[in-house]
Image (cartoon, rainbow, N blue to C red):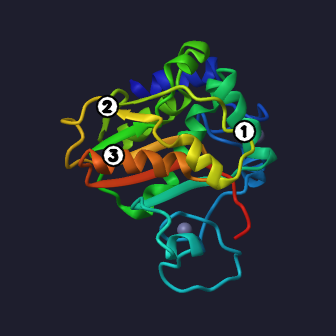
Amino acid sequence: MVNLLKSFLDFIYPPLCPVCGNSVSVHGTLCSKCWSEFNWISNPKCYKCGYPFPADLDLGNKPMCPHCASGECELDCIRSACVYDNISKNIMLPFKHASALKYQTLMSNAMINCLRDLNLDIDVVMPVPLAYKRLWKRGYNQATLLARPIAKYFNAGLDVDSVSRKYKSDMGHKTSKQRRENVRGVFQIVNKEGLVGKKILLVDDVMTSGATFYELNRVLRKAGVSAVYAVSFCRVVHAI
Ligand SMILES: [Zn+2]
Ligand SMILES: [Zn+2]
């Protein structure tokens, strides 16, 4: 009966690639041509922060980038599905600012895929909070839309209100150090009891310098969280 209903719905609303509109077999997935245009992050990559290394570099098991080797990244691990470039930007920005919800499934599925081999044990999935001023203006938090299916996949709770965020002007094109200073102190713990001892997966659409994840990790650890992981759809890859 479910299959019959699915066939009927597929007939009325045929599954189409959300980027180019070509026919695909499953709703919310990319056609093979569009899929091949993304710069998906695979191995080799930094075992801790997911920074992609050149494909021909053989660094052995669990390689680390210089930032992680120097202890700069205090999260347990970070993963991103793809590199931030003109292709991923054309999905990410409309999704963030123009309610392009047709990209939700492909983005969250790609994020789940890049976490799969880690076998994480997660209690709570937490979208990076948006300041109320931005939430009112935009009407939704794009990170929450991505976090919902990820929480379902991990059979974990979705926490959207244990941490709040103060409004601060856009970080723009600042250096990584300036971004870290700009984001310092913007997150406040609202519900400490709900966080103590929890293993948390943070979710965001893009990771630029990592400053937002680092700062959120800092306040969550202070609140007694036991593990912090993070995932983004795309990440800016600077040369290191
Ligand atoms: Zn396509
Ligand atoms: Zn790293």
Q: Is residue 53 above or below residue 202?
A: below
Q: Is residue 176 above or below residue 173?
A: below
From the image, tell me which residue sits under label 2. Answer: 162
Instruction: Say what amino acid the circle numbered 2 marks.
Output: Ser
What residue appears at the point 57 percent right and 54 percent down from the top-left corner?
Answer: 80
From the image, tell me which residue sits under label 3. Answer: 220
Instruction: Say what amino acid the circle numbered 1 marks.
Output: Gly
* SS under mark 2: loop
Whether residue 30 is visible here, answered yes or no, is: yes
Q: Earlier in the sequence, mark 3 or mark 2?
A: 2
Label 3: how many residues lie within 10 Å, few (<14), some (14-19) or many (20+)? many
In the image: residue 118, left or right of residue 142:
left
What residue appears at the point 45 percent right and 36 percent down from the top-left corner?
Answer: 147
- Residue 220 is situated, as x and y percent measured from the top left of the image, at 33, 46
Q: Which mark is residue 194?
A: none
Report the front residue among 61 and 197. Answer: 197
